[in-house]
Image (cartoon, helix red, strand yellow):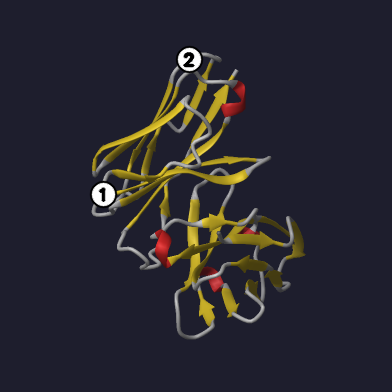
């Protein structure tokens, strides 16, 4: 299995531009998670989906952030407009759902975003 | 809501010495516990997890952890570290009612010195 795939691996953009991060979960996994990692705030859960449906988006910082999962094999995290404080590493992770199973999450390699 | 505290932000250790990384959690319900490792410029990967049963859990790369319910702890240990163990280590918890949603600690950076 190829594992969780994220693209791009690095993104440099100017303030005000739209940024779209992409994730392909492991085949057969039905839970998907988006995280943000910074030195100041550590690892933060932004949003997670079960069976393509957003379950908890309480970690999404503000309306500039949006996430979609149109099908079981693809998800996007969009920032519009981007700001320098959005600079971070964004991770996508997937797992097998069933509720309360304790299944571990498998992480992608991350997208390093720099907003200038 | 549950929370996780990793008491040490950085742990320097010499090669072949033992290491212990401390993790304490708080939760009003039963939890599942995890340790993840993040090597430089990589994503997180699972070291080990505790779901139920034996409180001593063995993981990959010679790591083990012990669940202590009375002290709400899940400390990670390795009897002899290698240079390749230099990484950041994250403790995490999940609860049954929250599916597989994880709450992470702040991480402990381990630097193994020759």
**Quadrant of residue B56 within the rendered picture:** bottom right
The residue at the point 56 percent across, 43 percent down is B41
A110 or B106, which lies in front?
A: B106
Q: How far apart are marks 1 and 2 (CA)?
A: 30 Å
Tell whether A116 sits left or right of A74: right
Looking at the rendered structure, the secondary structure element under dot 2 is loop
Q: Give me the residue at 57% from left, 75% from top.
A: B64
**Residue A99 or A28: which is nearer the viewer?**
A99
Are dots 1 and 2 on a single chain? yes
Outermost residue toward the bottom in this view: B54
Q: What number is the disc on residue A17?
A: 2
Q: Is mark 1 on a helix, strand or loop?
A: loop
Q: In the image, is residue B14 above or below residue A74?
A: below
User: Would you name the residue on which mark 1 appears?
Assistant: A51
Q: Mark 2 lies on which chain?
A: A
Rendered location of residue A93, percent (x, y): 41, 48
Q: In this view, does A42 lie above or below A20?
A: below
Chain identity of mark 1:
A
Is residue B113 visible in the rendered image? The answer is: no
Judge left or right: residue A102 versus residue B47. left
Determine crowd level at label 1: few under 14, some 14-19, many 20+ residues with C-alpha closer than 10 A: some
Q: Quadrant of residue A67?
A: top left
Q: In this view, does A16 lie above or below A47?
A: above
Could you classify mark 2 by the number of other residues whose Cα lies within 10 Å: few (under 14), some (14-19), or many (20 or more)?
Answer: few
Confirm or deny contact between disc 1 and disc 2 (CB under 8 A): no
What is the x, y in percent for residue B34? 51, 66
Q: Can residue B66 be seen here? A: yes
- Please provide percent x and percent y for residue B93: 52, 63
């Amino acid at each position: 299995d190829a594992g969780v795939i994220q693209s791009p691996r690095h993104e440099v953009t100017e303030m005000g531009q739209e940024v779209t991060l992409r994730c392909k979960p492991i085949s057969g996994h039905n839970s998907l998670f988006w995280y943000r990692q910074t030195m100041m705030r550590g690892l933060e859960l932004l949003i997670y989906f079960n069976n393509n449906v957003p379950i908890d988006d309480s970690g999404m910082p503000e309306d500039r952030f949006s996430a979609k999962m149109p099908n079981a094999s693809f998800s996007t995290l969009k920032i519009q407009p981007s700001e320098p404080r959005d600079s971070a590493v964004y991770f996508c992770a997937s797992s097998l759902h069933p509720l309360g199973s304790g299944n571990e999450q498998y992480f992608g390699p991350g997208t390093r975003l720099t907003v200038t | 809501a549950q929370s996780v505290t990793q008491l040490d932000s950085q742990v320097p250790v010499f090669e072949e010495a033992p290491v212990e990384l401390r993790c304490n959690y708080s939760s009003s319900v039963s939890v599942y516990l995890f340790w993840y490792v993040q090597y430089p410029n990589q994503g997180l990967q699972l070291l080990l997890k505790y779901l139920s049963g034996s409180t001593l859990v063995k993981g990959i790369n010679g790591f083990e952890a012990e669940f202590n319910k009375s002290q709400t702890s899940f400390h990670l240990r390795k009897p002899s570290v290698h240079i390749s163990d230099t990484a950041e280590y994250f403790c995490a918890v999940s609860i049954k009612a929250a599916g597989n949603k994880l709450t992470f600690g702040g991480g402990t950076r381990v630097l193994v010195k020759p």
